[in-house]
């Protein structure tokens, strides 16, 4: 198979979230299953048609997540994947599923995620020995760096130093996300938010304020992919994979080659090359916003503006409703939901925008959408370019 051949052979036909917000009555497996059942219903497919399982969880104690999800759903797969590169895992899994379907290994893949992070009262490393998350962290922990926010704060401070990025510009990212969330009935935080309120919130790790940081919620999501031939027999409009790329550049933030250059600088150009389009062709962007600086630097590295110009790019409501660059139209991880890892929700929203299903927050006619996931300490990146028509 030549590079890129898989893109014309597999499509996304179903997406859904589980219950979101705070769900103490549900386990992680139940959130996986709830999202899976809803996504299959969205696709108009049966569980017994699934022969590929791709699952991951943010809970450190869960071993072999795809195995556990498959057992819970009573599915014996021909293809399985538990790729764990943090929040970028799900964009990578879409690429993996497409390759498996194109190769004939399986015909229908179910990608799932579930997390009870809020009910467990935990951010990703709170109360967890750092070396259990990443062995090299044993060399960082004695110096007191709070993870993950400390890593992103280092990147934000460096970006401000090199390029003059201002706290007000970072706050614009959070305000835009909240404006989108106000139109999303599923969003966790929908109250009005101003730049002044972001700046008045307490510092968590300078220069990042509390409102510069993502939510902590429960929730899950699922994506169904199948062959183009099978999709033709379904009533749901398929979404096509135009381009994709994935990478990771480091584990520990101390090993990041450049604190202001994310893996998106590799995956963005690669995905655009594989799709045969340019950033200007994108109608809507769904970009990981674990912190405001994450989204700002990703915009630069994906090619939507030059390095160092992200702050100016987001000013004046450009990425908010009514702006010229609709981004994170569900409210993002800053205001919609963020159950440990957010990447699957980027895909779900992009698919709905392409299908024209987003109601008040619909960004007009969307022909091409970009999803970009970020994982770890700015460690990994995966980029998808999705289209409503085949390439």
Image: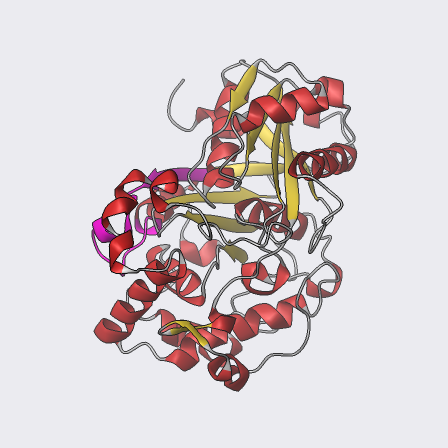
Find residue 141 and report its horizontal and vertical position in percent: 29, 53
Q: Is residue 307 visible?
A: yes
Q: Residue at x 29, y 71 (%)?
A: 157
The quadrant where residue 155 appears: bottom left
Nearer to us in this view, 270 or 122: 122
Left-right relation of 385 to 52: left
Find residue 150 and report its horizontal and vertical position in percent: 35, 62
Q: How is the image coloured?
A: secondary structure
Q: Is residue 308 above or below residue 95?
A: below
Find residue 261 and report its horizontal and vertical position in percent: 27, 56
Q: Which image quarter holds the N terminus?
A: top left
Q: Residue at x 50, y 33 (%)?
A: 93
Nearer to us in this view, 103 or 278: 103
Q: Is residue 227 visible?
A: no
Q: Which residues are magenta?
A: 243-265
Left-right relation of 360 to 296: right
Left-right relation of 12 to 270: right
The quadrant where residue 185 appears: bottom right
Q: Is residue 353 above or below residue 181?
A: above
Magenta residue check for 8: no
Q: Residue at x 58, y 16 (%)?
A: 106
Find residue 295 and report its horizontal and vertical position in percent: 43, 61
């Amino acid at each position: 198979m030549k590079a890129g051949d898989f893109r014309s052979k597999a499509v996304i036909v179903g997406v859904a979230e589980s219950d979101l917000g705070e769900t103490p009555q549900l386990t992680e497996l139940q959130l996986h299953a709830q999202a899976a059942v809803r996504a299959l219903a969205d696709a108009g497919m049966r569980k017994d048609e699934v022969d590929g399982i791709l699952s991951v969880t943010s809970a450190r104690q869960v071993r072999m997540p795809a195995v556990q999800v498959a057992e819970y759903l009573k599915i014996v797969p021909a293809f399985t994947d538990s790729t764990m590169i943090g929040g970028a895992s799900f964009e990578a899994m879409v690429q993996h599923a497409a390759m498996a379907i194109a190769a004939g290994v399986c015909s229908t893949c179910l990608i799932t995620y579930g997390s009870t992070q809020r009910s467990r009262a935990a951010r990703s490393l709170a109360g967890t020995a750092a070396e259990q998350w990443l062995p090299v962290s044993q060399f960082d922990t004695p110096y007191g760096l709070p993870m993950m926010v400390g890593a992103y704060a280092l990147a934000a401070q460096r970006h401000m130093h090199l390029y003059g990025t201002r706290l007000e510009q970072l706050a614009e990212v959070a305000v835009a996300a909240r404006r989108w969330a106000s139109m999303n009935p599923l969003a966790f935080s929908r109250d009005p938010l101003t730049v002044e309120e972001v700046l008045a919130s307490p510092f968590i790790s300078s220069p990042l304020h509390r409102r510069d940081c993502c939510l902590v919620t429960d929730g899950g999501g699922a994506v169904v992919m199948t062959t183009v031939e099978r999709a033709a027999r379904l009533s749901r409009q398929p979404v096509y994979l135009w381009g994709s790329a994935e990478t990771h550049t480091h584990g520990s933030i101390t090993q990041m080659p450049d604190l202001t250059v994310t893996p998106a600088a590799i995956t963005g150009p690669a995905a655009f090359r594989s799709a045969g389009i340019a950033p200007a062709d994108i109608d809507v962007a769904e970009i990981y916003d674990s912190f405001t600086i994450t989204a700002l630097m990703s915009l630069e590295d994906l090619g939507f503006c030059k390095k160092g110009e992200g702050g100016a790019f987001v000013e004046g409501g450009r990425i908010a409703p009514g702006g010229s660059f609709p981004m994170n139209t569900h409210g993002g991880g800053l205001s919609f939901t963020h159950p440990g890892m957010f990447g699957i929700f980027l895909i779900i929203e992009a698919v709905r925008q392409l299908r024209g299903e987003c109601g008040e927050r619909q960004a007009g006619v969307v022909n091409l959408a970009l999803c970009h996931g970020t994982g770890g300490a700015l460690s990994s990146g995966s980029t998808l370019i999705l289209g409503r028509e085949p390439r």
